Image (tube, rainbow, N blue to C red):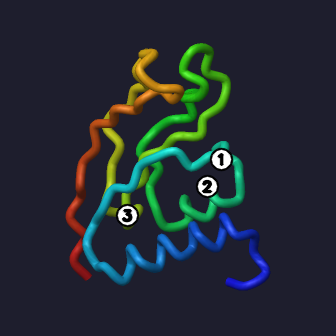
């Protein structure tokens, strides 16, 4: 929607594309935004966050969470477990999540 900051518009556009695609999906990456940021909240409106709030950046001494895994649509995903892996192979720490794809309920 017009009037929203660009990053929120992008989050909304990703959600609209996912809805149009019509299949469950997982999206992950560096969103450069902390969990309470408006663009992350926009994602959480229709996607399930498949991580916790553990910091992922910088890898040497992580202090902020800016890396995420999301499942769409939210009601089709269950987070079983999640872990941030300690490594120095990147400036971000990787996330490993065990998730379950849940069949939609019949109407």
Cβ atoms at labels 2 and 1 below 8 Å apart? yes
Quarter of the image holding residue 97? top left
Residue 50 x %, y %: 41, 45
Front residue of this view, candidates 80 and 66: 66
Cβ atoms at labels 3 and 1 below 8 Å apart? no
Q: What residue did someone put label 1 on?
A: 33
State which tag comes first along the sequence, 3 or 1. Answer: 1
| Horizontal relation, residue 22 to residue 44: left or right | left
Query: Is residue 79 shown above or below 58?
Result: below
Q: Which mark is residue 73?
A: none
Cβ atoms at labels 3 and 2 below 8 Å apart? no
Q: What residue did someone put label 3 on?
A: 72
Residue 64 x %, y %: 65, 30
Question: Circle 1 — which element?
Answer: loop
Question: Circle 3 — which element?
Answer: strand
Query: Is residue 30 shown above or below 27?
Result: above
Q: What residue did someone put label 2 on?
A: 40
Residue 98 x %, y %: 28, 37
State which tag comes first along the sequence, 2 or 1. Answer: 1
Residue 79 x %, y %: 35, 43
> Dot 1, crowdedness within 10 Å: few (<14), some or many (≥20)?
some
Question: Quadrant location of the N terminus?
Answer: bottom right
x 38%, y 73%: residue:
18
Q: CA distance from mark 3 to mark 2?
A: 14 Å
> Dot 3, crowdedness within 10 Å: few (<14), some or many (≥20)?
many
Quarter of the image holding residue 96? top left
Quarter of the image holding residue 42? bottom right
Q: CA distance from mark 2 to mark 1?
A: 7 Å
x 39%, y 55%: residue:
27
Front residue of this view, candidates 107 and 14: 14
């Amino acid at each position: 929607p017009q009037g929203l900051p660009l990053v929120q518009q992008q989050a909304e556009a990703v959600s609209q594309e996912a809805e149009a695609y019509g299949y469950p999906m997982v999206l992950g990456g560096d969103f450069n935004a902390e969990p309470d940021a408006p663009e992350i909240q926009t994602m959480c409106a229709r996607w399930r966050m498949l991580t916790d709030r553990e910091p992922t950046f910088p890898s040497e001494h992580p202090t902020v969470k800016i890396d995420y895994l999301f499942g769409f649509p939210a009601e089709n995903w269950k987070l079983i477990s999640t872990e941030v892996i300690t490594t120095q192979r990147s400036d971000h720490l990787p996330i490993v999540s065990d998730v379950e794809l849940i069949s939609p309920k019949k109407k």
